[in-house]
Amino acid sequence: KQEVTQIPAALSVPEGENLVLNCSFTDSAIYNLQWFRQDPGKGLTSLLLIQSSQREQTSGRLNASLDKSSGRSTLYIAASQPGDSATYLCAPMGYGGSQGNLIFGKGTKLSVKP
Amino acid sequence: NAGVTQTPKFQVLKTGQSMTLQCAQDMNHEYMSWYRQDPGMGLRLIHYSVGAGITDQGEVPNGYNVSRSTTEDFPLRLLSAAPSQTSVYFCASSYSATVRAEAFFGQGTRLTVV
């Protein structure tokens, strides 16, 4: 059964700092991996989707990497801003009976202080 | 550009009552799913559908029913609500269940069962 761990659980940084959020998963047989952000009381917003054949995906100040063989993904946020404060979730999508289902980590709660 | 729409946003039920959480998407997505989010548990899959007329159980299906009569709609039914079903419910959709399957989420339904 796929298990997803996100470290750290919470992170507080000053504005302008570059930071890395970590995601590890136990089953490397995945189609892709998706990163989301969730603001308090809101739904999930898709940030980046990395296919299993890709190593990196970039969108603006965000860069996500995927090392499928070692079961790791990182989300790099450059020049952080207070508006980046949210919970960040990673979710690999696996093969198998529940094909296409996302398995979520518990998230990293990020606070960027002005 | 509606995306995934969930109704209602908030609901309070008494134990034993029934209700239907609505989910609709306007992106012609094949794949739809329901998750619940509880503090400390992360998001867990309840039921999913890979197309009209096809549904299957996820990780926590007990107490919930689904049907998929159209591509656009995927309602979640609680037949006899219990306090353990107090949670935030999210509906998600994607173009397919496999590759290039970026998932989009609704804004959630916050359900309290008293």
Image (spheres, rainbow, N blue to C red):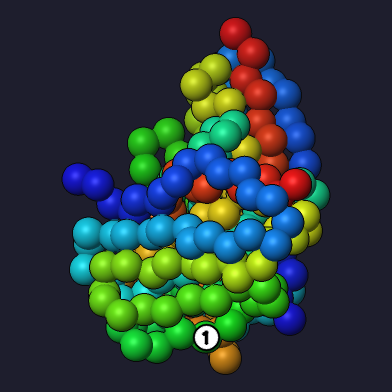
In screen coordinates, is A41 left or right of B73?
right
Q: Residue furthest top?
A: A114
Residue at 57% over, 54% down = B89
Q: Residue furthest bottom?
A: A97
Residue at 67% over, 45% down = B112
Task: Name the spot of residue B54 as percent of width and height, x first.
Answer: 40, 88
Q: Relative to residue A30, is residue B12 depicted above or below? A: above
The N terminus of chain A sits in image quarter: bottom right
Q: Chain of mark 1?
A: B
In screen coordinates, is B44 left or right of B3?
right
Q: Which residue is mark 1?
A: B56
Mark 1 surroundings within 10 Å by alpha-carbon count, few (fewer than 14), some (14 through 19), many (20 or more): some
Residue at 43% over, 34% down = A61
Q: Nearer the viewer, residue B75 or A100?
A: B75
Q: Relative to residue A57, is residue B31 depicted above or below? A: below
Q: Nearer the viewer, residue A41 or B110?
A: B110
Q: Within the image, what quadrant is residue B61 found in? A: bottom right
The C terminus of chain A sits in image quarter: top right
Task: Name the spot of residue A65 as percent of width and height, x first.
Answer: 53, 56
Q: Amino acid at mark 1?
A: Asp
Residue at 21% over, 68% down = B28
Q: Is residue A14 visible in the rendered structure shown here?
A: yes
Q: Secondary structure at mark 1?
A: strand
Callout count: 1
Q: Is residue A74 visible in the rendered structure shown here?
A: no
Task: Name the spot of residue B60 as percent of width and height, x first.
Answer: 69, 73
Task: Name the spot of residue A19 as percent of width and height, x first.
Answer: 62, 33
Q: Nearer the viewer, residue B56 or B29?
A: B56
Q: Relative to residue B100, is residue A17 depicted above or below? A: above
